[in-house]
Structures are given as C-alpha cells and as structure tokens.
Image (tube, rainbow, N blue to C red):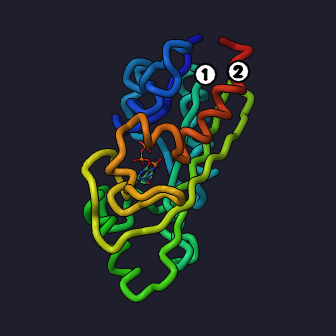
C-alpha cells in the first residue's frame, strides 16, 4: 500500500520506518513531488497535524498521514506545546532546551509529557490517533541520541533520558510509537 508520511524530519522518518517494517511502501514528501514547506498555522497540535495531512491530500491526491508533536510542561501550563519546535526563537534544539531549563529554574514540579497526534487522510476521509508519554525534566542534558528535548526528558518508570536510549528502545515507549501503534492497527485491513 502506498502511503506518504508528511514530514521533513529525518529522525522521525527513521523512527517510523523502524516501527512500520515492510508492510507499507512509505513515501517521503520529496518522493511524491512535494518540495514546499507544509502549513502549520493553527494553535493546537491536533489542528497542525490535520492541516499538514489535508494539504498533501488536497495538493497531491496521495493518501497520507502527518504527525504533530510537542512537549507539554505542567509548570508552564502546557507550554511549549504546539510551539515546541521554535520555543527558543528558531528551529534549534539547543536553544529550545535552554529556554525550557531557564523557565524551570525555580520550579519544583518538573513533570511533563510528550504528545503526538497523527492525522490520516485515506481517500479523503480524516482519522486521528493520539499518543502520550509522561516523564520528568532534568536540570541538565544527558545523552546524544534522538532529537529535540530528548536529552532532558526521563520517561516515568525509567532512569535514562530518551537521548540515552537507542532508537529501538525509545520506539517501544514513545508518544509517537503509541500513536503509531493505533495507526498501524487501523491500517491492518488495508495492507
Ligand atoms: P515536522 O513538522 O517536519 O514533522 P518537527 O521537528 O516540527 O517535524 P513535530 O512538529 O512533531 O516535529 O514536533 C515539534 C517539536 O517538538 C520538535 O521539533 C521537537 O522539538 C519536539 N519533539 C517532538 N517529538 C519529540 C521527541 O520524540 N523527542 C524530543 N523532542 C520532540
């Protein structure tokens, strides 16, 4: 089954390919001829996920799914949330982490959660799937795997940060894999 994953993030693509295996011929945006930046102008993770998937369906006529994720920090009332990618002012992981650590300097509650919402557009019909993982934010970075806020996030029930885990270990428990497990289940009859 031909399906496009609407992302430009190579780390995410690698994670999802590892999860999906060979069942689907997963196409990248480039492979379907989409070179432009996808719109992400709503103010929610759900909205941006849907906006990206619908854009690909409407402009390229290819079944596709998009995900949008973010880090929701309790002490910051759910920020950075939909603004996670640019929280430090630009699309720079170190800048984003620096701002979070600064804002949490005097916080006693360091709990947070990663959330992923996947939107699938299949022959024009829209479906959404959500995955969440809760954890704690460290005061300094540990590990070099992964991306984004991984070096400061320790999932509940674990000792190591996401950045200290292999792609496979993170893939077993992550917000994205939880959302994707639902997508894969949903797609089973179509494969
Ligand atoms: P695309 O929109 O091109 O798919 P993106 O980097 O913007 O890629 P998301 O919208 O899904 O990715 O996530 C927004 C930001 O949230 C992302 O840039 C990271 O800073 C953070 N984030 C999401 N998932 C993460 C993860 O598994 N580990 C660490 N940070 C993550």
Q: Residue at x 70, y 40 (%)?
A: 128
| SS category of the residue bearing label 1 | loop
State left or right for residue 66 relative to residue 46. left
State left or right for residue 168 relative to residue 59. left
The quarter of the displayed image where residue 159 is located? bottom left
Q: CA distance from mark 1 to mark 2?
A: 6 Å
Q: Position of residue 124 (x, y in %)?
A: 71, 26
How dense is the environment of label 2, judged by Cα within 10 Å: few (below 14), some, or many (20 and up)?
A: few
Q: Which mark identifies residue 132?
A: none
Q: Residue at x 74, y 15 (%)?
A: 189
Q: Earlier in the sequence, mark 1 or mark 2?
A: 1
Q: Which mark identifies residue 63?
A: 1
**Vertical arrangement, residue 31 with respect to residue 37, above or below:** above
State left or right for residue 65 relative to residue 150. right
Report the front residue among 34 and 48. Answer: 48
Report the front residue among 12 and 45. Answer: 12
Q: Are marks 1 and 2 in contact (CB under 8 Å)?
A: yes
Q: Position of residue 93 (x, y in %)?
A: 30, 57
Q: Residue at x 28, y 64 (%)?
A: 141
**Vertical arrangement, residue 173 with respect to residue 184, above or below:** below
State left or right for residue 47 relative to residue 4. right
Report the front residue among 150 and 77. Answer: 150
Q: Which residue is mark 2?
A: 123
The quarter of the displayed image where residue 8 is located? top left
Q: Residue at x 41, y 37 (%)?
A: 12
């Amino acid at each position: 089954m031909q399906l496009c994953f609407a992302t430009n993030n190579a780390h995410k693509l690698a994670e999802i390919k590892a999860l999906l295996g060979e069942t689907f011929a997963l196409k990248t945006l480039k492979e379907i001829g989409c070179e432009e930046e996808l719109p992400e102008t709503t103010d929610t993770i759900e909205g941006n996920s849907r906006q990206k998937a619908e854009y690909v369906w409407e402009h390229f006529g290819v079944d596709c799914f998009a995900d949008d994720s973010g880090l929701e920090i309790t002490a910051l009332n759910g920020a950075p949330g939909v603004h996670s990618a640019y929280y430090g002012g630009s699309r720079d992981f170190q800048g984003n982490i620096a701002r979070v650590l600064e804002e949490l300097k005097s916080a006693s509650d360091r709990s947070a959660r990663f959330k992923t919402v996947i939107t699938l557009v299949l022959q024009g019909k829209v479906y959404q799937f959500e995955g969440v993982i809760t954890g704690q934010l460290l005061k300094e970075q540990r590990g070099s795997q992964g991306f984004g806020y991984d070096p400061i996030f320790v999932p509940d029930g674990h000792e190591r940060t996401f950045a200290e885990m292999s792609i496979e270990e993170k893939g077993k428990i992550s917000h994205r894999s939880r959302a994707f497990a639902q997508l894969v289940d949903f797609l089973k009859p179509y494969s």
